Each structure stands twice: as structure tokens, then as C-alpha cells.
Amino acid sequence: FDNQNNETVVNFTLDRVGAKKFGRVTTKNVGKRLAIILDNKIISAPQIREPIQGGSGQISGNFTFQSATDLALLLRSGALPAPLNIIEERTVGPDLGEDSIKAGAISLLVGFLLVIFYMFYKYKLLGIIANLALIINLVLLLGILTLLEATLTLPGIAGIILTVGMAVDANVLIFERIKEERKTEKSLIHAFDTGYRKAQSAVLDANITTLISAIILFFLGSGPVKGFAVTLGIGIITTLFSAYYFARHLSSFYALK
């Protein structure tokens, strides 16, 4: 706003080279209009009231605050390095994204329930332990995402689904190793301890390589790819915690009983 008449104006400042050129032009064209052209379109055409020397000037007129702000933004931005041609224009409502999120959440829930039923059918009591570990895994994952104030997007849901798959894979490797150890007629507690110890290398290798991939995606990707990488990376950490801390201690408690 101009302090003298309280009008909305646009102030501008030029560099040394621009100030000299602008001073010559305004001196020769006092009383005429100076067109401001951006991308071959006349944005504004103010009248030159007096020579503008020193590189500082003011554009006044019947501006609203919004129109003055828009003009200032256009002057700061300058022309695009290449012409922009509109080939096609579409309007997509927010319902499309909402439907995608709902479909992703439903697929996550269905997959989670199928995994729970399969693990219980395949491993009975060990399957219950695996399911409890999986629930703890998801609670930790969603809790960390909530603390980070992360927005749950479709790629993020895909990362959670992949986390569920990797958590189940870790438990399957461990339980199959425990079943092999039980065939040697060792005690149950010894079979659990040996099974977890021998499966540790394979589980860690698989999760660490996936974690490295998630880190690379986070630093090299953008937008949705970063969201997927963050969810997957956190999911790997919670998977290792739930498998080797929660599930192992629960299994040891069961073996001692």
C-alpha cells in the first residue's frame, strides 16, 4: 500500500544494467504507456508519468490487493523457459482418491485376515504366536506413522501390505526351522532356541537388503515413492522387533510351560 494515498501499488527494483536501460526508455517515453508482456500476453500497461532513474519504480492503478499480488508474482517469476501449450484438461474430484484409499484399506484387511487364518491352520499354537506378533507389528508401525504425522496414502498402504508379507515370511522361516529341530528329538526349549538362532541369518539378510532398497528409494524417489519407502523401512524394523523380541519370548514362555 502507498503511504501517501493508501492505494494498492506494486513496487519494483532493477539491477544496475536494467536500471540504465529502463531510465533511457522512460525518459524518452514520458506520458506513454509501457506494456508489461509475459509469454506474449500483455499483463499490464501502466502510463509513464516521469523518468524512472535509479532502478526503483512503482506501478499504480485500480489494483485490488489480489491483482497487485498476482502482478508482483508474475514479475518475480518471469517468462517460462519454454512455451506451455494445453493439450488436454481434465477435472478429477476428490472421491476418486478416497475410493482408492478405501479399496487399499479393504485389501489390507482381507489380506491380514487370510494370513491369520492360514498361520493358525498351518502351525496351530505357533500360528497364534505368529498372529499376535503380526498384530503387535502393525500396531507399532501405525503408531510410529502417527507420531511422525504421516499421511496414509495408497503407496503407504502398499508398504504396509508388503510389511505383512515379510513378517509372515520371517515367522515361516523360523517355524520351519523349529519343526526340523523337533525331528531330532531334542527338547522343546532347545528346539525353539536352535530354530530361532539358525533362522536368524536368513531373516536378517532378507530384511536388511529390503531396508537398503527402501533407503535408496527414499533418497532417490519423490512424492508417493518416498511415502512407500518410509512405510516399508519402518515396517522392516518393527518386523524384526516383533519376530525376535516379542514372538521369541512368547515362544520361550510356551516351551517352558
Image: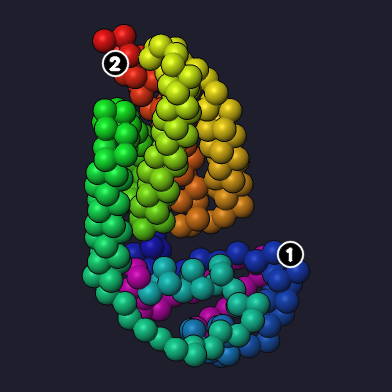
Quick check: 18 left or right of 179?
Answer: right
Q: Nearer the viewer, residue 23 or 117?
A: 117
Return the x and y of residue 214 as percentages of the image width and height. 55, 45
Q: Earlier in the sequence, mark 1 or mark 2?
A: 1
Q: Which mark is residue 254?
A: 2
CA neighbours of label 1 inside 10 A, class few (<14), some (14 to 19), many (20+): few
Q: Is residue 92 above or below residue 217?
A: below
CA neighbours of label 2 inside 10 A, class few (<14), some (14 to 19), many (20+): some
Q: Nearer the viewer, residue 89 or 184?
A: 184
User: Measuring 42% from the left and 27% from the top, which residue is drawn there?
Assistant: 179
| Mark pair 1, 2: CA separation | 81 Å
Going by the numbered disc 1, the residue's amino acid type is: Arg
Question: How many numbered marks are there?
Answer: 2
Quick check: 196 left or right of 29?
Answer: left
Q: Is residue 179 above or below residue 49?
A: above
User: Measuring 37% from the left and 84% from the top, which residue is drawn there?
Assistant: 90
The range drawn in magenta is 45-66
143 in the magenta segment: no
Return the x and y of residue 107 as percentages of the image width and height. 28, 57
Q: Which mark is residue 16?
A: 1
Q: Is residue 207 above or below residue 162?
A: above
User: Measuring 38% from the left and 63% from the top, which residue is drawn there?
Assistant: 1
Q: Circle 1 — which element?
A: helix
User: Measuring 49% from the left and 84% from the top, which residue is drawn there?
Assistant: 43
